[in-house]
Amino acid sequence: MMRLRRVRQRYHTRGRTYLEELGAEVSGRFSSSEQAKKALLFLEHTLAINDILIAASLLARDFEDITLAHREHEATLKTKPLRVTYMQRLREGGETAITQTLIPDAWLDMYVGDRKKQRYWRFSIWLELDRGTIQARKFIRKARSIIEYLKSGEYQKRFHSEVALIAFVTTAGQDRVHQICTWIHEEAERTDDTGIEPLFFTTAISSPPDPLDFFFSPLWLNPGSDKPTPLFHTQAE
């Protein structure tokens, strides 16, 4: 009986790994303590997203030249998840078609105006909140799926915007910021997609962000760059 259990567990693990490599979400075994932990992480995740949405709302409230035209929370985006299909190389050789579901944690559409110059800039933000719990393989798969979604043209159709700022916000500290940037950079290099890297931004937060600093201070990093940058650039080129 013990041998049977070991064999079943071995194939169970191999099966999970195979499905995860194909992009499938594979649930684990039930554990009441693990479920409680997941519930707490979900609550903290939701509260952190809400803090960022509140910061955007306060920014638009306090500055008349800034407009929050539209926002979508994860709860709304879940009702119409994004999907992308692309070809992925297999370890044993060859390729297979992967269909991946994407649900941003939030999407914001903001405008910043300059009344003197009678100009405005549009910033459409795809927000992803990271709590440092996702390992490299799963994170890279998400980054790859986002890259492919942007390349497919479906983003413009879904959000009616030609602007995309993919903003990863982590609560796991500055080391995690550099790790995220490295993962995205290496994946973009692997498939010759480095031209899309300026669309990706990563920063760390430890408390509700200051609205002005969060969007306009050089607190963000792009993949492949060590120079901090603001999320919003309004300088004329």
Image (tube, rainbow, N blue to C red):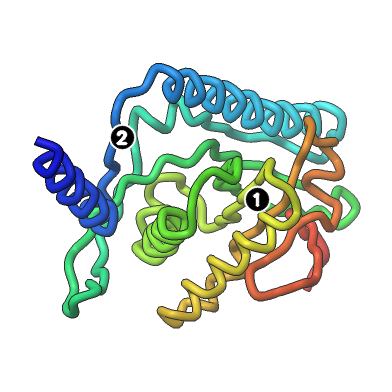
Q: Which mark is residue 199?
A: none
Residue occupied by mark 2: 28
Instruction: State the residue at coordinates (45%, 25%).
Output: 75
Compared with residue 61, is residue 13 higher up or lower down, i.e. above or below? below
Compared with residue 60, is residue 123 higher up or lower down, i.e. above or below? below
Please state the horizontal and vertical placement of residue 226, each as a whole percent of the image: 76, 72
The answer to whether residue 80 is left or right of residue 226 is: left
> Which residue appears farthest toward the right when viewing the image?
116
Please state the horizontal and vertical placement of residue 42, each as a whole percent of the image: 52, 26
Residues packed near mark 1 inside 10 Å, few (<14), some (14 to 19) or many (20 plus): many
Q: Nearer the viewer, residue 67 or 75?
A: 75
Q: Looking at numbered disc 2 in the image, what kind of residue is underneath it?
A: Gly
Q: Nearer the viewer, residue 53 or 118?
A: 53
**Quadrant the C terminus occupies:** bottom right
The answer to whether residue 92 is left or right of residue 37 is: left
Sequence order check, earlier mark of 1 and 2: 2
Mark in front: 1 vs 2: 2
Examine the rendering and report whether any part of residue 150 can be seen: no
Q: Which mark is residue 123?
A: 1
Distance between mark 1 and mark 2 Cα atoms: 38 Å
Instruction: State the residue at coordinates (41%, 79%).
Output: 191
Count all numbered tags in the image, as a single digit.
Answer: 2
Marks 1,2: beta carbons within 8 A: no
The answer to whether residue 189 is left or right of residue 203 is: left
Instruction: State the residue at coordinates (31%, 24%).
Output: 30
Q: Nearer the viewer, residue 205 or 159?
A: 205
